[in-house]
Image: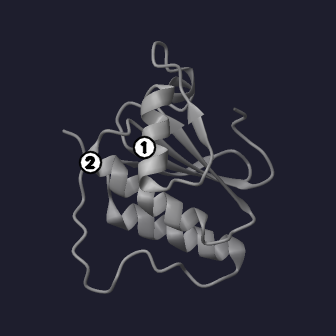
């Protein structure tokens, strides 16, 4: 997978059995349907093909998923992934502008703002006002 191109990228990576990753992926799927033509969203699965297919079907994931080799993790290693879930906002020049490890509401809000700016559109409604969304980071 190339690390740069002419559009922005949002990479979502992790092991599908993690509860925090399920929320992470569902939100990424919501952002994917937001309709930003200047954005490519790619999931990186650190699970085998069968587990990934089960997760995709169960949670209705519609963005493309890259299957990382579960013995050597070449894609994860290329992006320096150490914990899951991890999400990256990659600028047009290939530079990583946002790196969020775990589940951090403010990071998703920042990504949502960047998506809206790049699409010259209003932000997607991803959190309801007053909704209690707690952060989670692996220790």
Residue drawn at (35%, 48%) of the image? 21
Determine the residue positioned at 26% across, 79% down.
131
Residue furthest toward the right? 6
Report if residue 50 is visible in the image: yes
The residue labelled by disc 1 is 55
- On the image, the x and y values in percent for residue 61 come to 52, 53
Q: Secondary structure at mark 2?
A: helix
Crowding at label 1, few (<14), some or many (≥20) Cα neighbours within 10 Å?
some
The answer to whether residue 89 is above or below residue 86 is: below
Query: What separation in Å lies between label 2 and label 1 (alpha carbons)?
Result: 12 Å
SS for dot 1: helix
Residue 102: x and y in percent read 32, 48
- The answer to whether residue 102 of the structure is visible from this angle is no
Q: Where is the N terminus found, in terms of image quarters?
A: top right
Q: Is residue 16 left or right of residue 10?
A: left
The residue tagged 2 is: 19
Residue at 61% from the left image edge and 75% from the top image edge: 116
- The percent coordinates of residue 93 (x first, y second) are 74, 49
Q: Earlier in the sequence, mark 2 or mark 1?
A: 2
**Relative to 92, is 126 on the left or the right?**
left
In the picture shown, does residue 108 fall above or below 41?
Answer: below
Quarter of the image where the C terminus is located: top left
């Amino acid at each position: 997978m190339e690390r740069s191109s002419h559009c922005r990228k949002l990479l979502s990576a992790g092991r599908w059995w993690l509860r925090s990753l399920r929320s992470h992926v569902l939100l990424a799927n919501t952002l994917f349907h937001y309709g930003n033509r200047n954005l490519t969203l790619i999931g990186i699965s650190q699970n085998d093909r069968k587990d990934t297919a089960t997760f995709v079907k169960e949670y209705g994931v519609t963005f493309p998923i890259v299957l990382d080799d579960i013995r050597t993790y070449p894609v994860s290693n290329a992006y320096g992934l150490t914990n899951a879930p991890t999400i990256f906002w990659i600028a047009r020049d290939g530079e990583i502008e946002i790196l969020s490890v775990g589940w951090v509401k403010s990071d998703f809000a920042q990504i949502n703002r960047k998506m809206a700016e790049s699409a010259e559109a209003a932000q997607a409604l991803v959190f309801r006002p007053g909704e209690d969304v707690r952060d989670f980071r692996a220790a």
